[in-house]
Image (spheres, rainbow, N blue to C red):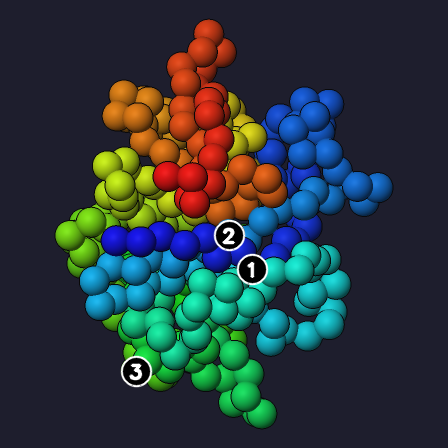
Amino acid sequence: MQLYTIDTGYFKLDGGAMFGVVPKTMWNKLNPADENNLCTWAMRCLLVEDGNRLILIDTGIGNKQDTKFFSHYHLHGDSSLDSSLAQHGFHHDDITDVFLTHLHFDHCGGAIIRQGDQLIPAFKNATYWSHADHWNWAVHPNDREKASFLKDNILPIQESGQLKFIEGESFTDNFSVRLVNGHTNSMMLPQLNYKGRTIVYMADLLPSAAHLPIPYVMAYDMFPLTTLQEKKSFLAEAVENNYLLYFEHDPQIELAELVQTEKGVRAGATLKLTEL
């Protein structure tokens, strides 16, 4: 197995929404906001080369929405999904599997592209993987979450015939799946055995290292008390087993080890995949 970081650029989200009930005087030290109270976040995907499979975990926000939509999120940075794949010698057509942790627009927008007046899969040779319970949740969204589930990102996947659903905890021999339900129903976290270490792709359970303290729960989470319990349980397991955490949204930290401190679990050594 070989892993590759896929940077798809940065965007901005409201700091208060990202840190929930935590006061700005505290979270602003971790990710300083601009004059509009917006903080910068990464959209860091992961490419898994496993035997004859090339698996892309999440796809970033994509580029098919209109100018008004993107004006809310201030996309910036030099990286894109295409350029990051090319940097590692790959092309869209090489991808065999697209694994979508969940169907919020910043995680699956790049899965579908606009070609003329058609919406088609960006990865024509890939199987797209979701979770059946989450899929049903996304296509019949609640009023609070529906702005994150865009039909243009989701329905064309099924219409293409390339959609399949994950069953069980094993995806490949070295790639297992954890389910969590606090952020959204049945979000999938990839857990990878890599070079003698266990790496967990955190998606939105822990969007950044700044979210390691237990009360630091996003206002975007549908079930914040569930997130609290999931964080407590996972972090205890991660410390005990020396997991490496891969952060999708941290603007600076790609991978982190964990340490137990008097204040709780915090990031220890930070590193990049290329350093493993």
Question: Disc 2 residue type?
Answer: Arg
Is the C terminus in the top left, top right, bottom left or bottom right quadrant? top left
Question: Disc 3 residue type?
Answer: Gly
Q: Is residue 38 left or right of residue 2?
A: right
Q: Nearer the viewer, residue 156 or 123?
A: 123
List the residue tagged with mark 2: 44
Q: Residue furthest right?
A: 35
Q: Earlier in the sequence, mark 1 or mark 3?
A: 1
Instruction: Find the distance from the CA under tag 1 to the CA under tag 2.
Output: 6 Å
Asked whether residue 245 appears in the rendered view, the answer is yes
Q: Are marks 3 and 2 in contact (CB under 8 Å)?
A: no
Q: Where does the image place residue 162, in percent across and percent down from the top left?
A: 30, 78
Q: Judge whether 116 appears above or below 214 on screen.
A: below
- Residue at (20%, 49%) from the top-left corner? 174
- Residue at (68%, 50%) from the top-left corner? 12
Q: Is residue 68 left or right of residue 3?
A: right
Q: Secondary structure at mark 2?
A: strand
Mark 2, other Cα within 10 Å: few <14 / some 14–19 / many ≥20: many
Closer to the observer: label 3 or label 2? 2
List the residue tagged with mark 1: 8
Q: Earlier in the sequence, mark 3 or mark 2?
A: 2
Q: Earlier in the sequence, mark 1 or mark 2?
A: 1
List the residue tagged with mark 3: 161
Q: Where does the image place residue 114, in percent across and percent down from the top left?
A: 55, 83
